[in-house]
Amino acid sequence: MLPVTGTQEVVTSTASPPSRSFPSTQDRPTTAGQALSSGSKVSKSSAVPPPVKSKGLNSGALVRQMRRIIAEDAEWSLATVPLLTELCIQHIVKNFKNNPLLKKLLPQHQQKVLKLLSPDLPLAVTANLIDDESYWHRCCVLRWPVCHLDSHGSWKRVFFERHLENLIKHFIPGTTDPAVILDLLPLCRTYVRRIRVDQFLPPVQLPSRPHSAGDQSDSGSEGEMDEPTMDHYQLGDLVAGLNQLEELDLVYGVKDCGMNFEWNLFLFTHRDCHSLAATIKACHTLKIFRLTRSKVDDDKARILIRSLLDHPALEELDLSHNLIGDRGARAAAKLLSHSHLRVLSLANNQVRAPGAQSLAHALAHNTNLLSLNLRLNCIEDEGGQALAHALQTNKCLTTLHLGGNELSEPTATLISQVLSVNTTLININLSCNHIGPDGGKQLLEGMSDNRTLLQFDLRLSDITQESEYLIGQALCANREEARQRTLNPSHFLSPLTAKGPENPAS
Amino acid sequence: MNPQSGPLGVLGENEEEHLTAEIRGPSIHSENPQERIQARRLRIAARLEARRREALGEYLDGKKESEEDQSKSYKQKEESRLKLAKLLLCGTELVTNIQVATDIRETHRRVEEEELRRQRLEKLENEVKTSHDKFDEITAKWKEGKEKRIPQELWEMLNTQQEHCAGLIEDKNKLINELQQELKMKDDQYVKDLKKQSDDISLLLERMEEQVKSVMKTFRQELNHIEKAFEVERQELLISNKKKWERALQAHNAKELEYLTNRLKKVEDYERQLRKQRVWDFEEYNTIKIKLEQDVQILEQQLQQMKATYQLNQEKLQYNFQVLKKRDEESTVIKSQQKRKINRLHDTLNNLRLKYAKQIKQFQEDNQSLTSEYKRLVIQYKELQKSMRHFTLIDDEKFREIWLMNEEEAKDLISRAFNIDKIIHTHHLGLPWTAPDFWFLKNVGPISQKQQKSATQILEEVLMQTEEEAAEEAGAAPESYLDLPKRVSAKTTRKILMLLCDESGFLIESKLLSLLLPLEKNECYLLRLDAIFSALGIENEDDLYTLVNFFLKYQAHHLPSSQIGPWHLSPLQDRASLASSMEPAEQLDLQGEEKQSLEEEEAPSSPRLIHPNDVLKILEAFVMSLRKPRDSRAPVKLLKEVRDNSKDSEYWKALATVVSQATENLWDGLYLALEKYHFVLTQRAKLLAENSALEQQNTELQALLQRYLHSKINEELQIPPIQVFQMPTQPKRP
C-alpha cells in the first residue's frame, strides 16, 4: 500500500515541472527507487515535505548511498539544529525589555514568548502589552506566597491591585516620593477595581515622639494639636486616576507595631477625613466603601456621609468598628433615603436608641436596602421597637443583624408580629440579647406564620431550649421549601412563560 | 420547544389542527376574517392548555419517579443532603459561637464598664466635693490665721493647716493610687483579654480546621454512601435486566424450536408437492415439446419461404437502391444546378428589385406629375364642361331659333306656296282648292324640344284637367293624356296627390294654412301641395312622377299576393296602351328614364288601396331614395341633351315635299304658259312703259329747259348756256 503511494507521488512529481527541488531528470529513477525501497518514511515526508528535507535530497546527488539513509531520517536534522523561529523567540525574550515585540508575532509564537518571559520585567513594559493570564499568574506567585483569584476576576488584576495596595501600605508621607504611586497610575488604571488597604503609615516624626509618649493617656485632646503633622497618604490623586475603581476598603491604622505602640499611630485626622470625603465624592464608579477600625467619630462620619449623599453608584457602606454615635447614625439614615444603598453596616459602634429610631424612620419607606448590620451597638428596646415597626412597612430588607444590642421582651413581641407579616426577611440575628423565655415563645409564635425566613440566630439570648429547637425546626422547613423553589423554578414560572406567547399571537 | 422536537411538534400541531377543525365550528380557512381570528385564538388557548398540562404532568411524574423508581438512591441522596446540611449548620454555629460568646462578653464588659465608670465618676465627684469643702475650710482658716497675732497660736494653727493640707493631699494621693491600681488591674485585664482573645482565635482556627476536616470527611463518606447506593441500585437493575433478558431468551429459544419443527414439516410437505408437480410437469412438458417440434418444422418451412422471398426482396431492393442512388446523384447534380440557378435568379431578382424600386420611384414621380396634370385637366375639363353646357344651352337656343326661323321661313314659303297654289287653283285654273293637312305643319320648334314643366304647373294641369274631366264625365280621357303623357293616369295621380295633401299637412306652415282657409278647394289643394313639394324637395315633373310611382310601387309591394298577377302584366299593357298615345321622341326620351327605373313602373291600379297611415312611411322612403339619385343626375341630364337628328332631315324633307309632284307639273305647265303670257305682257308693258317714260322725259326736259331759260345766271354769263343748249339739244333731239 505505502510503496504504491510513493510511486504515485514520484510519478506526479516528475510529470509536473520541477518546481519542487528535485535534483535533475537523471536522478529521477533513483529517487523513485528510494521511494519504493524505503516505504513509510518517504511517503510521509513526501506528503508533507519540509524545507530541510528537500535540501538533503538536493545534496544527495553525489553521495547517494549515505544520503539515502540520512535523508530519510527526518528527525535527525531537526533535532540538532534549533528552528530559526525558536532562536528568534529566544532573542526576543532576551531583549524584551528594550524591544517588546509581541503583537506582531503569530499566536503560537506569542504563546512561546510569554512562556519564556521572566516575571520581573519592568511594569512599564509589560503592563499594557501583556494580557496573558499565565504570565501574570507567574508574577503573582513570585511576589506573594499566598494569592488566589477569588473575587478578583483575572490574575493581572490581582497583580496590579496587590501591587498598588502594597505601595500604599508602605507609603510614608513626607519621606516617600508620591510619584512612586502616581507613576504606576497610567499602567494600572484599567485593571484596578478594588483597593483594600489595612494600614496607613503616619509620617516619621522623631522629635515629637517623646512628647506624645508622655501624654498617651489622654490622646484625644492632644491629637488635635498634632493633627497637621499626623496626616496620612491622600488618596485623592490616585483614586481620581483609577476610572474602574469600584471598591474602597480602608483601615486607618498601623499593623505590627509591636512595642512601638502609640495612640498617634491610629489617628484618622480631620484632614484625612476631608480628603477622603472629597475623594469618594469624586469617584463616581465607587460601589463599595468600607472604612473600619479607624476611630471614625460622629463628626467625621457626618463629613463622610455628607459627601456620599446622592452618590450615583454606591451600594455598600461599611463603617463598622468605629466610634459612631447617634448623630452619625442619623446621618446614615439620611443617606439611606438619598442613595441606592443596598448594604449598610454600623457594627460595633456606639449607636443608641435615638440613632436606631432615625434609622428605623428611614428604613420604613426605603426600597433599596437589603442588609442592615447594627451588631454590638446599644439601641436597646426603644430602638429595637422602632426598627420592628419600620419592618412592618418595609418590603425590601432581607438581612438584619441586631446582635448584642441589649434588646429584651418588648422588642421580641414586636419582631414576632413582623415575622408573621413580612415576606422579604431571610436572615435575622438577635443573638446576645436579653430576650428571655417569654420573648422566645412569642418569637416562636411569629415563626409559625412565616415561610420565608431562613436564618434566625437567637443564641445566648436567654430563651428556652424548647422554643429555640422549635424555631430551628421551622427554619428547616422554610429552608426545604426554599430549596424546592430553587430546584424547580420552572414549575413555578411555567404559568408565566406559558402566558408569554399569547400576547404576540393575539 | 427545542429545535429537535420541532418537526414532531409541527406534526402534533397539524394533528391537533385537524382534530380541532373537525370538532370546532369556526374554521381557519373560512371566509369570514372574524371567524378566522376566533379560530386562531381558540387554537392558541388549546395549545397553551396542553402545554401546561404536560408540564404539570411531567413535574408530577418526575416526583413520583424519584420517589418510587429511584427510591434507594434518592433516599440516600436526601439523607446525605440533610445530614450534610445539618453538619454545615452545626459547624457554622460552633464556629460562630465563639464570636457570639465574645460579643456577649463584650456587651457584659461594656455594661460593667459603664457601671464602673459611673461609680468612678460618682466617687470622683464626691471626692471633689469633700476636697472642695476641706479646701474651703482650709482657706477660711487662713483668714483666721491672719488675724492671729500670737505666734504660738499661729504656729498651732499653721500646724493644723498643714495637717489638713496633708490630709487633703493624702486623700488625693489615695484616690490616685486607687485609680492607678485600677489602671493596673485594667492593664492586667487587657493582657488577660488579649490572651483570651488569642486563645479564642486559636480555638476558632482549631474549630474551623476541625470543621473543614469533618465536613470533608462527611462529604466524602456521604459521597461514598451515595455511590454505593447507586452501585447497589445499578447491580439490582442489572440483575433484574439480566433475568428479564434470560427469560426473554428462553422464550425466544422455545419459539425458535417450534418454528424449526414447523418448518421441517412444511419442507417435507412441499417436497412431496414438488415431486408430484414435477411428474405432472414432465408429462405436460413432453406433450408440449412434441407439439412445439411440429410447430418448429412448420415454422422452418415458413422460414425457408420467407428466406426466399427475402432474397428476392433483397435483390429487388438492391436494384431499387442502385436506382435510387443514381437518382440521388442526379438529383444532387440537379440540385446544384438548381442552386446555381437560384443564385443567379436571386441576383437577377435583386437587380430587378432595384430596378423595380427605381421604377416605382420614377412611376411615383410620374404619377404625381400625372395626377397634378390630371387634376389640372379635370379642372379644365370641368371648365370645359361648364362652357360646353353653356354652349349647348346657347347652341340649343340658337338651334331652336334657327329652327324656328327656318321653320317659319319654310312655313312661310309653304304658306306662300299654298296661297299661290290656291290662287293658281282658284284664279287661273278655276278649280276648287283644298289645303293639304300634314302633321309637320302643325309642328312648331324642334321635334325633341319639350319643355320640362315644373311640378306646380303639372299639378295645376292635373287638377284642372280632372276638374274638366269631372265636368265632361270622363268623356275625353284620351285627349287629356296628351297633356300628361305618362303611364300613370291622371286620376290616380290626382288621388295620390289628394291623399298626400291630406296626410302631410304637417309639412305646411301653420300661417299658410290659416291663409288657405278662405280659398277655393282646388286652389287650396294647389297651394298646399306646392308647400309640401317644396318641403320634400320635389322640383320638376320627373320628381313628381317618381313620387307617384313610389306610391304605387309601395302599394304593390304591400298588397297581398292576389294583386301580384296584374302587377306583372300591367307594365306591358300600360306601355302598349301608352305607346300609341306617345310621340316617338317622347317615347325615346322616356326609355332612357325607364332604363334606370324599370321596376318602378307601376300599374295605374286603384290608389284607394293605399291606406292613409302608410303615406308617411312611403314619404320617408321616398325622401331617402330621392336623396340618393340626386347625385347621379348631372350625367343623365347630359345624355338627355343629345338629340336625334334623324327625324330632322325627314321633317325638313317632308317640309320640302309639301308641294306634290302633280301640282309641280301643273305649276310647270302653268309656268310655261304663263311665261309666254308674261312675255307678251312684258313686251307690251315695256312698250307702254317706254312710251310713258318718253312722255315723262319730254315733260321733264321741257320743264328743265324752261327753268334754265328763266334763270338769272343766263343773263350774267357772257355766253349763256342757253345758246350752248341750243346746240346739243339739237343733236340730242334726234
Image (cartoon, coloured by chain):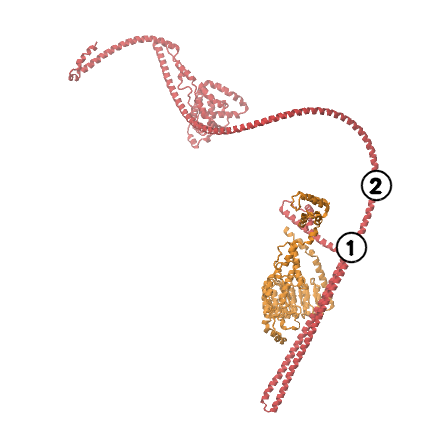
Q: What chain does badge 2 belong to?
A: B
Q: Which residue is mark 1?
A: B234
User: The disc labelled 2 sits on which kind of residue?
Assistant: Leu
Q: Position of residue B250 (x, y in %)?
A: 82, 48
Find numbered disc 2 in the image and state the secondary structure of the residue it sits on: helix
Q: Position of residue B561 (x, y in %)?
A: 55, 24
Q: Position of residue A329 (x, y in %)?
A: 62, 68
Left or right of B705 in this view: B136: right
Disc 1 vs disc 2: Cβ atoms closer than 8 Å?
no
In terms of depth relative to the viewer, which is nearer, B474 or A235? A235
Q: Does the image show residue B280?
A: yes
For chain A, the rendered hue is orange
Chain with red colouring = B
Task: Name which of mark 1 and mark 2 comes first in the sequence.
Answer: 1
Find numbered disc 1 in the image and state the secondary structure of the residue it sits on: helix
In terms of depth relative to the viewer, which is nearer, B280 or A477? B280
Where A270 falls versus B322 (above or below)? below
Q: Which mark is residue B264?
A: 2
Where B612 falls versus B420 (above or below)? below
